[in-house]
Amino acid sequence: MNGFDGRVLIVPPTRRDGDITARVLDEAGLRSRVCAASELAAEIHRGAAAVVLTDDVLDPSYVSGLWRELQAQPDWSDLSFVVLARGGMASVVLDQLQTVASVTLLERSVHIRTLVSAVQMAVRARKRQYQLRDLLASERQARVDADRANQAKDRFLAILSHELRTPLTPIVYAVSSLQHAISSDGPQRRAIDATLPRALEMIRRNIALETKLIDDLLDLNRVVRGKLQLQTAIVDMHAKVNDTLLMVENDARGKGVALAATLTAERHHLNADGARMHQVLWNLVKNAIKFTPGGGRIDVKSWNDADAFLLSCCDTGIGIPADALSRIFAPFEQGSDDTTRRFGGLGLGLAISRSLVEAHGGTIAAASLGRGRGAAFTIRLPGAIAAPAEAHPRGRGNGTGRRRQLRILLVEDHDDTSRALRDALSASGHTVDVEHDVAAALRAARAQPHDLLISDIGLPDGSGVDLVKQITRPRCGAIAISGFGMDDDVRRSLAAGFDRHLTKPIDYDQLDQVISELARSANVQRPNGSRGG
């Protein structure tokens, strides 16, 4: 049974009776069809809102087919029969009919208005049955969708747990090994010098991987909520490609994969978000390295088509099955569960890359000849221009040729983090005063002027927002550090008075660059280098 069928089936004793009844029902706005008793079962199968008949047309010789059709109705269906009977006497057949359908008995001499009213009630009841059927179907589908969503969530959480734990495992082992070696004497202690650089590089690499996973989740959230924002400027895409290949060169070499670039686009500058373009390129090339076995090759090419800049990344890797191409850009997809188990990852890079490319008005497409036959990803971005002439060469620093050491007030309640930041800042030549809460930080600020404030947002007796609103503004400004990095978190920090918001885990090179930028900006604004009040 498909949608509601408003037809009323009329089974009359004579054709003339049928025509009269049909005309009456039609005038009342009811659709009707006159049919023979032998056709009734087939017509009900096609769909009917109600049946009007007389008690003498139900001949036992063909009623068995009608019975089978009525007994086969689904649970929600209860077809109504309006039966015109002589003197109110019910036959054995009518008694049986009442066991499988709703029956309304009317006298043969029934008034037309009574007949029409009974049929209208039957049609309304039938319509409600279909509405109930549709509601039940919607609820069943909702349950199915919810079950699928829960299964997807459980699968995602399992993968996420694995992916977040994987980079931590070698870090824990390396740190434990170094601690054991440092606490011992003899050859183990002397071996530290040989193993420390490799261990530190491994720790750095895995922390970077952990940070990338978290950043991808945040980026996906921004895309889903429509909160992705671009900071555009003129970007040299060839420079971005070369920077990306330089960054992944060691990974490719370690795996035995050859990298090659053929950049022939004459117009390779775009008005774009440089950081986001780098993110797209990094995702594509890292994916190619990940899915290309040793001895394979990755080719990155660029060219122009009219005013568009095109770039392709082609590999000789494991390829993409035809049935997976249509969903390769969907979040948490890597083609198959087997691919996820073999290669790891959350399957977010391509989804985020597509969103970033489309946010720039471009397109990204995937192609593959199948398993084991490599893959190619092609980006098309509009508005390519020739290299713009720079009006003024950009200089660095404040013209003295050396960085100025600052007195920094660091407010961080996590002991390990505060010690690590203090040591790193001190190693860069800065003087660092460390406090752990808002009250102590305010006392320190009153006792000694500082050039820069670096504060965690979550503190035991308040927040970094409370602190930056109350403290006398340092000469070089204030930097917020927090484990919360959503757009709303950043906006709250900047609105409160922080100049920058950095999300943990903080890359020290990034922090050092921000400190240098704030110091340069302060020197430009105050050439005499005087302190703020």
Image: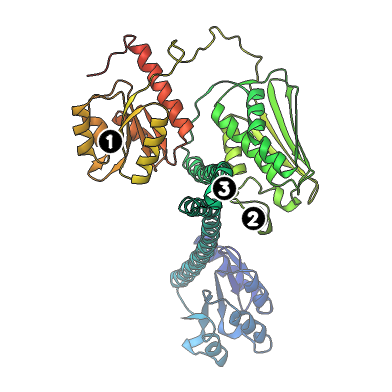
The residue at which mark 2 appears reads as: 340
Q: Amino acid at mark 3?
A: Ala
How dense is the environment of label 3, judged by Cα within 10 Å: few (below 14), some, or many (20 and up)? Answer: few
Across and down, in percent, residue 233 comes to 54, 20
Q: Earlier in the sequence, mark 1 or mark 2?
A: 2
User: Is disc 1 in contact with disc 3, using a CB cutoff of under 8 Å?
Assistant: no
Instruction: Judge left or right: residue 447 versus residue 71.
Output: left
Q: Are marks 3 and 2 in contact (CB under 8 Å)?
A: no
- Residue named by callout 3: 191
Rendered residue at 69%/20% (across/down): 307
Determine whether, in the image, residue 365 is placed left or right of residue 230. Answer: right
Q: Secondary structure at mark 2?
A: helix
Residue at numbered disc 1: 465
Q: Amino acid at mark 2?
A: Thr
Q: Amino acid at mark 1?
A: Val
Q: Quadrant of the N terminus?
A: bottom right
Q: Is residue 525 above or below residue 50?
A: above
User: Where does the C terminus fall, quadrant-wise?
Assistant: top left
Seen as rendered, the residue at the extreme front is 186
